[in-house]
Image (cartoon, rainbow, N blue to C red):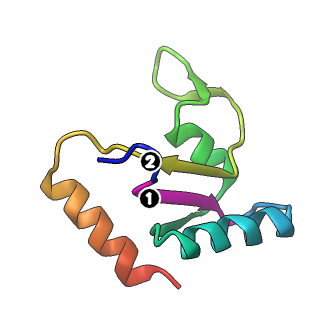
C-alpha cells in the first residue's frame, strides 16, 4: 500500500474556516479519497487521541481537530469493510 495516499478523510462539520473546508473537499475529490463528515472538531479530536481521559474514562481536556486522515487501517476486517461501505453510501 502506498502510504502517501489516505484511505479515508474525516472533516469536522463545524470547521469555521470555509477555505480550509473547500481545500480538503477538493483534495479528497481530486485523489478519490472517501470523505466522512464528523459532527464536531471536539469529537474528532477525541477520536484521534487528542483528549486526556480521567481514570473513570470521561474526557478531561481535549484539543479540537478539523481534519484527520487514515492511511492504514491495519488488518482488513469486516468492520473496516462496513465503515467504507457506509462512507461511500453517505458521502455527498
Q: Compared with residue 23, is residue 60 higher up or lower down, i.e. above or below?
A: above
Residue 41 lies, in percent from the top left, at 68, 51
Residue 46 lies, in percent from the top left, at 56, 38
Mark 2 neighbour density, 10 Å: few (under 14) some (14–19) many (20 or more): few
The residue nearer to you, when weighing 59 against 85, is 85
The residue nearer to you, when weighing 90 against 4, is 4
Of callouts 1 and 2, the N-terminal one: 1
Q: Which residues are magenta?
A: 6-13
Q: Is residue 26 highlighted in magenta?
A: no
Mark 1 neighbour density, 10 Å: few (under 14) some (14–19) many (20 or more): many
Q: Is residue 11 highlighted in magenta?
A: yes
Residue 39 lies, in percent from the top left, at 61, 62
- At 77% from the left and 60% from the top, the residue drawn is 15
Q: Which residue matches tag 2? A: 70
- At 63% from the left and 67% from the top, the residue drawn is 27
Residue contact between numbered discs 1 and 2, judged by CB atoms under 8 Å = yes
Q: What is the number of the mark on residue 74?
A: none
Q: Which residue matches tag 1? A: 8
Amino acid at each position: 500500500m502506498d502510504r502517501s495516499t489516505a484511505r479515508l478523510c474525516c472533516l469536522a462539520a463545524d470547521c469555521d474556516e470555509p477555505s480550509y473546508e473547500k481545500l480538503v473537499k477538493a483534495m479528497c475529490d481530486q485523489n478519490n479519497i472517501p470523505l466522512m463528515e464528523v459532527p464536531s472538531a471536539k469529537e474528532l479530536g477525541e477520536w484521534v487521541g487528542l483528549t486526556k481521559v480521567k481514570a473513570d474514562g470521561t474526557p478531561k481536556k481535549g484539543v479540537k481537530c478539523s481534519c484527520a486522515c487514515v492511511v492504514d487501517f491495519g488488518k482488513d476486517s469486516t468492520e473496516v469493510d462496513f465503515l467504507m461501505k457506509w462512507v461511500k453510501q453517505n458521502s455527498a
